[in-house]
Amino acid sequence: MDCKKERNLKKCNCTYEPCSRKGLCCDCLSYHLSARQLPACAFPKDAERTYDRSFAHFARLVQTGKI
């Protein structure tokens, strides 16, 4: 399977600039799941900016209807 990094970058909403995994979704997902987190793309723009990528933060957003 070929990585579609350039296409992925167009949709990537990660604001963490020094991230080496931008556009490499499989690497990004693996990294965040190993840290018990979700990647930026799972969060709305304002929530992503907090850098709180925890499952708990995601659940709170779902419970409050923000996702």
Image (cartoon, rainbow, N blue to C red):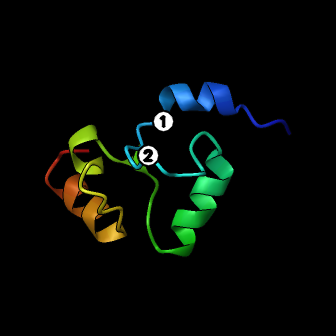
Residue 67 image point, x, y percent: 26, 44
Sequence-wise, the earlier of marks 1 and 2 is 1
8, 19: nearer the viewer: 19
- Relative placement, left or right, of 55 versus 1 is left
User: In whole angstroms, how far apart are the C-alphas of marks 1 and 2?
Assistant: 12 Å
The residue lying furthest to the bottom in this view is 35
Give the total number of marks visible in the rendering. 2
- Relative placement, left or right, of 51 versus 40 is left
The residue lying furthest to the front in this view is 18
Does residue 6 lie above or below 39 as drawn? above
Q: What's the residue type where badge 2 is placed?
A: Glu
- Within 10 Å of the Cα at label 1, are there few (<14), some (14-19), or many (20+) other Cα atoms? some
- Relative placement, left or right, of 15 versus 49 is right
Residue 32 image point, x, y percent: 52, 64
Does residue 46 lie above or below 64 as drawn? above
Q: Mark 1 against mark 2, which lies toward the viewer?
A: 2
Residue 50 image point, x, y percent: 24, 56
27, 58: nearer the viewer: 27
Specify the label residue 12 is tagged with: 1
Residue 41 image point, x, y percent: 43, 43
5, 60: nearer the viewer: 5
- Within 10 Å of the Cα at label 2, are there few (<14), some (14-19), or many (20+) other Cα atoms? few
10, 20: nearer the viewer: 20
Q: Residue under label 2, please give it.
A: 17
Does residue 60 lie above or below 41 as drawn? below
